[in-house]
Amino acid sequence: MARVIGNTARRFPVRVMEIADAAQAVVDEIESLARASLREQRRLVVGLPTGRTPLALYAEWAHRVGSGQDALRRIVTFNLDEFLDIAPDHPASCRSYMRTHLLERISLASDAAAFPEAGRCEAYEAAIGAAGGIDLQIVGIGRNGHVGFNEPGSARDSRTREVALALTTREDAAAAFGGLDRVPLRGVTMGIATILAAKRIRVLAFGAAKAAIVHRAVHSRASAALPVSWLRDHPDVQLIVDRDAARDL
Ligand code: GLP
């Protein structure tokens, strides 16, 4: 069971484990949910993030599909966010990242993997609804406490929308884009309410660089200043961290 840490009314259940074990645990959960969905004649709907954090998870997922776990490729995915004002096949786009790290490796049909797009925010919400809602949403945490591109200031009732990216977010993306001046100023993201509507949420954070934001996520008052803190309200959320990220808890 998850260890519960926190001194606020709403607590984040926290699980501390090695990154490789976290990848196993989350893929185990996806696999078991995917099998259950297939027994109900439907496909599991998974919400997915980009970034360094889920790389071990995607590697494990692809490895299992490669060793015959077919349920793990009979799913539908909705990505959390995307940069705006770049071509969809730009090498630093979230779409390119997902193709490289997961979608091509599990041979997921392109019509089973959705991404938010400029000018189609309501359509994205409608598509999630039409798929039956998100069964399991995985998110990372930006060092400023963002989830997806829900930057500080994001309201709890926010939905999929176009947003201005925070400077720290753009700085973190600078290497992938070949310099800060090439990083888009805008993105499109599922909102906090979109994420909270998922049936289950797993928040991942690994490494000492995330220790400070993990401490704030667990101990600060829930507010728009720290978007990840809104996720504590969810009835089935877990914060999964390694020992380095849990250092200050
Ligand atoms: C990025 C993405 C988020 C991601 C976060 C953390 O900007 N928009 O979806 O979770 O920042 O990234 P990383 O995992 O590389 O620390």
Image: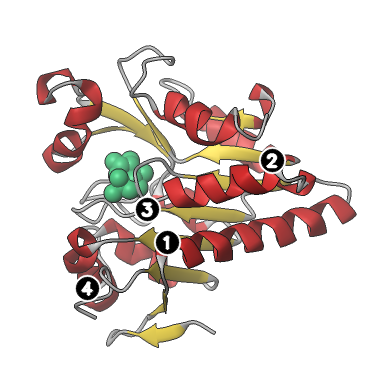
Residue on which the image places disc 2: 66
Residue on which the image places disc 3: 140
Mark-to-mark CA distance, 3 and 4: 15 Å
Q: Measuring from the top left, give residue 243's x and y in whole percent.
A: 30, 74
Q: Quadrant of ligand 1?
A: top left
Residue on which the image places disc 1: 203
Mark-to-mark CA distance, 4 and 1: 13 Å
Check mark 3 vs ligand 1: CB closer than 8 Å? yes or no: yes
Residue on which the image places disc 4: 215
Q: Secondary structure at mark 2?
A: helix
Question: Dot 1, how many residues are within 10 Å of its Cα: few (below 14), some (14-19), or many (20+)?
Answer: some
Q: Is residue 162 above or below residue 181?
A: below
Query: If you read the primary sequence from the N terminus, does the residue marked by circle 4 or circle 1 appear first?
Result: 1
Q: Secondary structure at mark 4?
A: helix
Camera-near label (2 vs 4) is: 2
Dots 1, 3 in contact, CB < 8 A: yes
Residue 180: numbered disc: none
Type of the residue with mark 2:
Gly
Type of the residue with mark 4:
His
